[in-house]
Image: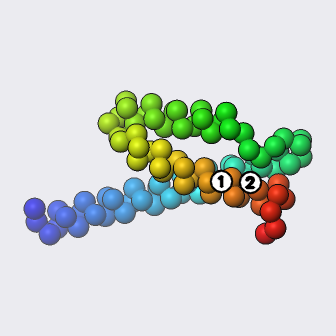
Amino acid sequence: MSDDRLEDLRAQLDRIDVRFLDVLRERIELCVRIAEHKREHGVPMMQPHRIGIVQERAEAYGREHGVDTDFLRNLYDLVIAETCRVEDLVIGNVPA
């Protein structure tokens, strides 16, 4: 593979990474809005059934698209942990 071709492929990967990070940021911002709603309506932050739904959807996506389901579970464990942390801050369950 030529160096130019490799650089082109890496540039494509870099553009995908930016989109990935933008979508992740959007997801966290939406979780802030959800936390604000929970705070305003007295809804508990932790919603275990919802976490299960998200994990099951990611697992189904992995099976359908050939992405390792253990990888997706680990990825979502990290994403969910961060969004729970952010929701706790918004709701006021932990000091900022």
Contact between labelled residues 2 and 1, with CB atoms less than 8 Å apart: yes
Give the residue type that dot 1 points to: Thr
> Residue at coordinates 69% horizontally, 58% vertically from top-left?
85
> Residue at coordinates 81% horizontally, 67% vertically from top-left?
95
Q: Which of the image's four quarters has the C terminus?
A: bottom right
x and y percent of residue 14 in the render? 37, 63
x and y percent of residue 86 in the render? 71, 58
Residue 26 showing in the rendered view: no
Say which of 74 and 27 sits in front: 74
Mark 1, other Cα within 10 Å: few <14 / some 14–19 / many ≥20: some
Give the residue type that dot 2 points to: Glu
> Residue at coordinates 89% horizontally, 41% vertically from top-left?
41
Q: Which of the image's four quarters has the N terminus?
A: bottom left
Say which of 12 and 82 sits in front: 82
Q: Is residue 25 left or right of residue 91?
A: left
- Label annotation for residue 83: 1
Task: Give the spatial CA distance, label 1 vs label 2.
Answer: 6 Å
> How many badges with numbers are in the image?
2
Secondary structure under tag 1 reads helix
Q: Quadrant of residue 65?
A: top left
> Residue at coordinates 76% horizontally, 56% vertically from top-left?
88
x and y percent of residue 66 in the render? 32, 36
Mark 2, other Cα within 10 Å: few <14 / some 14–19 / many ≥20: many
Secondary structure under tag 2 reads helix
- Label annotation for residue 71: none
- Label annotation for residue 87: 2
Q: Quadrant of residue 43?
A: top right
Quick check: 7 above or below 48? below
Residue 5 showing in the rendered view: yes
